[in-house]
Image: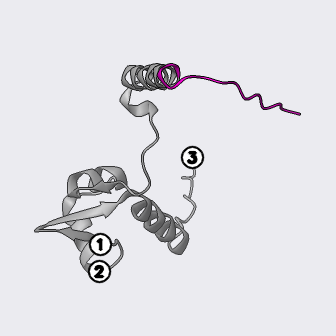
Amino acid sequence: MSHVLFTAIDLKELQSIIAQTVRQELTDLAASPPGARPPEPDELLDRAQAAKLLRISLVTLYEYTNKGILPAYRCGTRLRYKRAELLSALKQVHVANPRPPRKRPIA
């Protein structure tokens, strides 16, 4: 069982503790490699990033967007894609079109 202990602390000391903790967290975050942070699911990707994530060409991405396979959002004159929706659409495509097993050549 955890215990909660309340102690009297003045405002300056509390501000100092908070500032020190925030400073340490920012230092740790800056020191971590870029790939170590998990991507945000609602992160908006441009066309090149979306194509790279799905490992398809920009032409294929354009076709999938026009056919409604991949949802896109218009930001001014540019298209953006939500990372989570791209991964969800990719899973649906894999479920709908399972790859047939390979036939091994007779040696």
- Secondary structure at numbered mark 3: loop
Q: Which mark is residue 11?
A: none
Amino acid carrying mark 1 in the image? Tyr
- Secondary structure at numbered mark 1: helix
Amino acid carrying mark 2 in the image? Lys
Count of all numbered marks drawn on residues in the image: 3
* Residue occupying the far right of the picture: 1
Q: Is residue 85 left or right of residue 61?
A: right
**Residue under numbered circle 1:** 64
- In front: label 1 or label 3: 1
> What are the residue bounds of the magenta stretch?
1-13
Distance from disc 1 to disc 2, alpha carbons, whole Å, reads: 5 Å
Task: Based on the picture, tell me whether residue 98 belongs to the magenta stretch.
Answer: no
Q: Is residue 16 left or right of residue 2?
A: left
**Residue under numbered circle 3:** 107
The overriding secondary structure of the stretch rendered in magenta is loop
* Foreground pick, 99 / 36: 36
Residue 30 pos. (x, y %): 36, 23
Please tell me whether residue 69 is drawn above or below residue 86 in the rendered image: below
Task: Based on the picture, tell me whether residue 7 belongs to the magenta stretch.
Answer: yes
Dot placed on the residue nearer the N-terminal end, 1 or 3: 1
Please tell me whether residue 107 is drawn above or below residue 50 in the rendered image: above
Residue 93 pos. (x, y %): 46, 70
Amino acid carrying mark 3 in the image? Ala
Task: Locate the N terminus by quadrant.
Answer: top right
Q: Which mark is residue 67?
A: 2
